[in-house]
Amino acid sequence: MSDKRSKKFNSFEGIVFSTAPDYVFEDNSLQEESSPSRVQDLRVQLDKKRRAGKAVTLITGFNGSFGDLETLGRKLKQKCGVGGSAKDGEILIQGDFREKILTILKEEGYKVKLAGG
């Protein structure tokens, strides 16, 4: 517990300190709005690099907020019945589910293509 706690309190990322009496804090952490699904241009590919030979389906090209990326990732994981993650503008789904994900994303209204070999 103390390890988690020390990481939380020792992280000063995003905190601004100022001794100027006329300093006004500007919140620049506004979420960018997600583009509508019909405008999104997603790529679905199989990736085995740096994963000990295990295959993952990689979805790239998402433009929008982190919350919307996580929501889409959660939906894909549930429909495929597997694990995965959503971070850095990419969604990773464990296993080879390219065709299934392609179908799901098209039903959701996304422009999507298979990428890679």
Image (cartoon, rainbow, N blue to C red):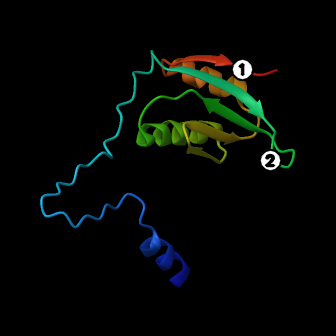
Per the image, label 1 sits on a secondary structure element best described as loop
Amino acid type assigned to the residue bearing label 1 in the image: Ala
Name the foreground residue: 106 vs 1.
1
Q: Outermost residue, left direction?
A: 22
Question: To which residue does mark 2 refer?
Answer: 51
Q: Judge left or right: residue 38 versus residue 17.
A: right
Q: Give neighbour class at mark 2: few <14, some 14-19, many 20+ (Cα, 10 Å).
A: few
Residue 53, given in percent of the width and then of the height, sits at: 87, 44
- Residue at 39 percent of width and 29 percent of height: 34
Q: Are marks 2 and 1 in contact (CB under 8 Å)?
A: no
- Residue at 34 percent of width and 62 percent of height: 15
Above-or-below relation of 18 to 62? below
Of the residues under marks 2 and 1, which one precedes in the sequence? 2
Residue 42, given in percent of the width and then of the height, sits at: 58, 22
Return the mark for residue 115: 1
Residue 41, given in percent of the width and then of the height, sits at: 54, 18
Per the image, label 2 sits on a secondary structure element best described as loop
Q: How many marks?
A: 2
| Alpha carbons under labels 2 and 1: distance apart | 19 Å
Amino acid type assigned to the residue bearing label 2 in the image: Arg
- Residue at 42 percent of width and 74 percent of height: 9
Residue 99 appears in view: yes
- Residue at 31 percent of width and 60 percent of height: 16
Q: Quadrant of residue 23?
A: bottom left
Above-or-below relation of 102 to 70? above
Q: Quadrant of the C terminus?
A: top right
